[in-house]
Amino acid sequence: MSKLTGKIALVTGASRGIGRGIALRLARDGALVAVHYGRRQNEAEEVVRQIEQNGGSAFSIGADFSTLNGIRDLYAALDEELRKRTGNNRFDILVNNAGIGQILTLEEATEESFDEVMNTNVKAPFFVIQQALPRLADGGRIINLSSFVTRAASPSVFAYSISKGAINTLTLALAQQLGNRHITVNAILPGIINTEMNAGTLQNPAGRNSAAGLSTFNRWGEPEDVADVAAFLAASDSRWVTGQLIDASGGSHL
Ligand code: NAD
């Protein structure tokens, strides 16, 4: 039996990048995975196909988190699919991964850019969690995607780093609140990972050099480097770990 056999996971933003890596990994460990996507249904269905080809189980759910209607859409679809499969709408593991990057200094930011990054990276996960709580099984898991930029001043991604700082605080507060239900709440702080979010940086030699140089291992990360940490946090091995902000950055915070 695999570590997550019988568990159900919802991974937001799992159509590509880190979320995709986490969805593939949790499915490999035996979980039934709800692969959420924002806009790109084809990519999400491709992730589901890949999971099924590897002998796992998954389904996709589309919902745009730009407004709270999207959160309602997410749970309406999830409830319907889970009731069909299990007779109720309980699930065990929530991975709050969907988010946007934003390379803007304090001076360059506008009200619109500020609202966009806060709505997607803070408001959406806040309400995804609020709506998850009545559905999440006792002994479950919440895993939030933060960033290594919360470890040091990061002027080139000013508002983005503040949005991830809010995720750190949310993680601590929630871990304390959910202890009585034995739900663990932790955040992963990735360094530079090879995803579409960093396509601009990683496509030119200077960007590649500086991305690799941030890590003490002199390379940037791959989605699997983060997914393996998520797999630990999702499994019973991590039952005594809660309220932790875990770097998966190859030492970039050093
Ligand atoms: P990505 O751009 O490759 O994927 C982002 C995912 O979020 C996509 O599936 C997209 O559909 C979803 N998403 C974005 N906006 C959405 C919206 N309004 N509604 C619904 N879904 C939406 O990004 P990634 O690099 O895989 O990043 C995943 C998470 O990891 C993010 O929270 C990001 O901030 C964090 N992170 C990434 C890095 C990195 O270097 N890539 C580093 C640290 C933290």
Image: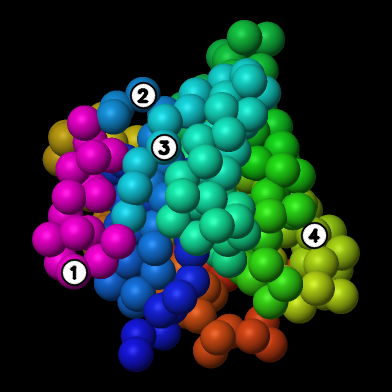
> Which amino acid does the dot numbered 4 rest on?
Leu
Q: Earlier in the sequence, mark 4 or mark 2?
A: 2
Q: Which mark is residue 55?
A: 1
Asked if the residue at tag 2 contacts the one at tag 1, i.e. Cβ–Cβ closer than 8 Å, the answer is no
Q: Residues within 10 Å of mark 2 (few under 14, many from 20)?
A: few
How far, Cα to Cα, is label 3 from label 1? 20 Å
Kindly state the secondary structure of the residue where label 4 is placed: helix
Mark 4 = which residue?
A: 174
| Residue designated by label 3 | 61
> Residue at the spot x=25%, y=66% of the render?
56
Amino acid beneath label 3: Ile
Q: Is residue 73 magenta?
A: no
Q: Is residue 69 visible?
A: yes
Q: Measuring 69% from the left and 76% from the top, which residue is drawn there? A: 139
How far apart in space, not on screen, are marks 4 and 2 (Cα)? 29 Å
- The answer to whether 196 is drawn above or below residue 52 in the figure is above
Instruction: State the count of labels.
Output: 4
Residues at discs 3 and 1 in contact (Cβ within 8 Å): no
